Image: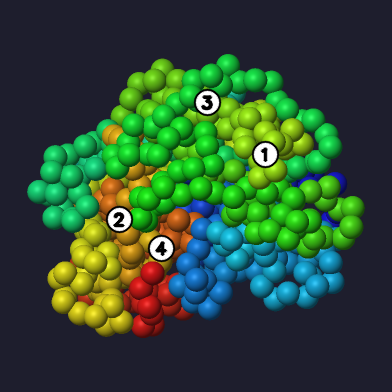
Amino acid sequence: MRRRDFLSATSQFLVLPRWLVGAREIRADLAVIGGGTGGCAAALAAARSGLRVILTEETDWIGGQLTSQAVPPDEHPWIEAFGATRLYRAYRGAVRDYYRRNYPLTEEARGREQLNPGDGRVSRITHEPRVSLAVLEAMLAPHVSGGRITVLLQHRPLAADTDRDRIRAVTVRSADGTERVLTAPYFLDATEQGDLLPLARVEHVTGFEPQSKTGEPHAPRDAQPANIQAFTFCFAMDHIAGEDHTIEKPSEYAFWRDYVPKLEPAWPGKLLSWTDTHPITLERRTHPFDPDCDERGSDGGLWTYRRLARRRNFAPGAYRSDISLVNWPMNDYWLGNLIGVSDAEAARNLARARQLSLSLLYWMQTEAPRPDGGAGWRGLRLRADVTGTSDGLAKYPYIRESRRIEAEFTVLEQHVGTEARRALQGRKAEDLAAEAFPDSVGVGSYRIDLHPSSGGNNYINVSSLPFQVPLGALLPKRVENLLAAAKNIGVTHITNGCYRLHPVEWNIGESAGATVAAALRTSTTPRQIRNTPKLLAQLQAALSAQGIETAWPRLTPR
């Protein structure tokens, strides 16, 4: 399959199966609401256990963070060896194989076992979002053809029919206004912002919990439910030296060009600048930026951080330039939220976030200081084809923080934070370990990385220990047949900062799907499984057999 065949090869899910056209009620064993990273993993896990699954997705691309939000995987240092599920590693391997089969790689790049198409610094596998889309659709395809998974693209949850502690049905609405009622014994909320929770009246929280409730060292004194991490409209760009690809001046450019963030601790100056705050030290730092870094022999600075395609990895002429993904501090939007506000206000915040990202690009094209003393790189070209949109921005904003269930168990900073663990245990760093959860259904690792927030906080970025995912964090404290399957699990504003990244969300979704399969197989509930030692041991053994790790070896904290 050549690259020109990409769209036709990945279009099968845009067409509803004939039997579904006109259908107003669809029944399955499991309805997964949200087709992002966690939702795809959940559907795959349930289908491999023989369940019939409905998977809905708000956009026309499954994959969430990996595709419609255009963010290449953020991963821990040990990802090639352990600390992820077998299925997630299969996805990563398929991404590399896709490039080897379909792209004109150089012989050196093709021979690299750990091929990194973009050679980005954020991950060992930075790549273009359309490749993740093709891989995820290929992973789903056998189950779609076999009737085990039905994918409903461009469908959003509209309402939920509940009966005391159970959800009986969820109504979704398609882009053309068609409403369908989904009925199933179990539902997973794998939406980007926990959209099913308020519809089904599932108890949940938003924003910053107070220290009096969590005891977390970095929590505020009072609850701040509207204090939510920034979201970002990512975009891809390349650089064609000698050409002018300057976009039309954004309507809000004057505002964003002059905007000085009001954060605590203070931001060092204007947002549109190469100077910002170091996330860990909160000291002033200045970024290098060089889109022609390979020619100049520099590291490129921000250009290479999330680079999706490195031209020198491909045959001469295959790419006119590297392609870089812009998900930087300069286009984080924290002047308003998307949840806990009216639809009109959310729409205004989305529009302003788009303007911020376009203003950043326009600033880089026209006014950004260059190392040679000049201003702007007019050859920077917005790559709308990479994101699959008309305006060049990602299909969906990169969401860092969701509504979160009030769970059977909530993960706190004291469970995973390095300094918090040291304060509790009084041990040396090499002896520290995150809390061992007896109901572990997965693992993950990432720093507690909180971006500036709508309440005026600057970065909170502290060390965490490789951690486990407790089953109790996936279970609402009351509702029996809904599990959280994305960033909406039982974590706090603080611990969301390390549980929100790609491989962890995948693990959460995969374990949620597997847990539902176990509950249906044993005629029990996920809560009964968690609270019954024999059933829990059986579930964990089944997870292990499916390649889902539930414990870490001894590692050095990050």
Which residue is rendered at x = 28% and y = 48% of the image? Answer: 493
| Disc 1 target residue | 373
Mark 3 vs mark 1, foreground winner is 1
Q: Amino acid at mark 4?
A: Tyr
User: Which quadrant: the C terminus?
Assistant: bottom left
Q: Amino acid at mark 2?
A: Thr
Label 1 neighbour load within 10 Å: few <14, some 14-19, many 20+: few
Earlier residue among tags 2 and 1: 1
Query: Height in image: 381 above or below 282?
Result: above
Q: Nearer the viewer, residue 473 or 171?
A: 473
> SS class of the residue under badge 2?
loop
| Disc 3 target residue | 257
Mark 1 vs mark 4, foreground winner is 1
Mark 3 vs mark 4, foreground winner is 3
| Disc 4 target residue | 446
> SS class of the residue under badge 4?
loop
User: Which quadrant: the N terminus?
Assistant: bottom right
Label 2 neighbour load within 10 Å: few <14, some 14-19, many 20+: many
Query: Height in image: 39 above or below 338?
Result: below
Residue 165 x %, y %: 22, 44
| Disc 2 target residue | 495
> SS class of the residue under badge 1?
loop
Residue 92 x %, y %: 61, 65
Which residue is rendered at x = 70% and y = 25% of the image? Answer: 247
Label 4 neighbour load within 10 Å: few <14, some 14-19, many 20+: many
